[in-house]
Amino acid sequence: MSLVKKEEVIQALLTSPNLQANMQEIVDAVNTLDLNALESEMRSRVKVERWKGEKIAGVDLYNHPNPFLRDQYRYIIDSGGVIYKVYIDGNLVFLQYHHPFKGGLEPITEAEFEQVASRHVDDIVRHMTLTEAFTRAMRTIISRRAR
């Protein structure tokens, strides 16, 4: 079952200021989407890798030139926290060095790493799927009107 529901795509289209379509046009366009396949497509673009101490963009995190970031990285590394990287289409988009679902500078423990990274990926994939579903449905409506 997809992380995104058809009703969410319909709602997004209904509230779009750039689209003037009636409910039937919107529903018909959304019904052409296979949200499970679209989610799988988006998920295949996202990869997680555990940080193993390598430099990121030529920068050693432990000796980061920005003192604020250096202090944060050192705190997480010295506390044994797990740091991971999220790639979309092979491009680094997140260097996650603290718990993304807790406030403050909370380290990600070894025991919770897999669950945290999986939930983070689900959030990213959900957003990507909703955005792509919206775009494809809008294109369908526009192309049907052009006929």
Image (spheres, rainbow, N blue to C red):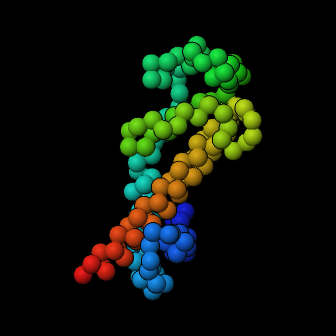
Along the viewing direction, whichever of 9 and 77 lies nearer the viewer = 9
**Residue 59 position in % (x across, y down):** 49, 18
Q: Residue furthest bottom?
A: 24
Residue depicted at x 40% and y 71%: 137
Residue depicted at x 38% and y 38%: 90
Q: In the visual, does 135 lie left or right of 116?
A: left
Q: In which quarter of the image is residue 133?
A: bottom left
Residue depicted at x 53% and y 37%: 94
Q: Which residue lies furthest to the top in this view?
A: 63
Q: Residue furthest left?
A: 147
Q: In the visual, does 140 lie left or right of 43?
A: left
Above or below, 73 relative to 132:
above
Above or below, 52 relative to 93:
above
> If the image is split into quadrants, where does the C terminus sit?
bottom left
**Residue 46 position in % (x across, y down):** 45, 46
**Residue 93 position in % (x across, y down):** 48, 38
Residue depicted at x 50% and y 69%: 17
Above or below, 13 relative to 69:
below
Mark yes or no: residue 111 visible. Answer: yes
Number of numbered tags placed on the structure image? 0
Mark yes or no: residue 1 visible. Answer: no
**Residue 68 position in % (x across, y down):** 66, 21
Along the viewing direction, whichever of 54 and 22 lies nearer the viewer = 22
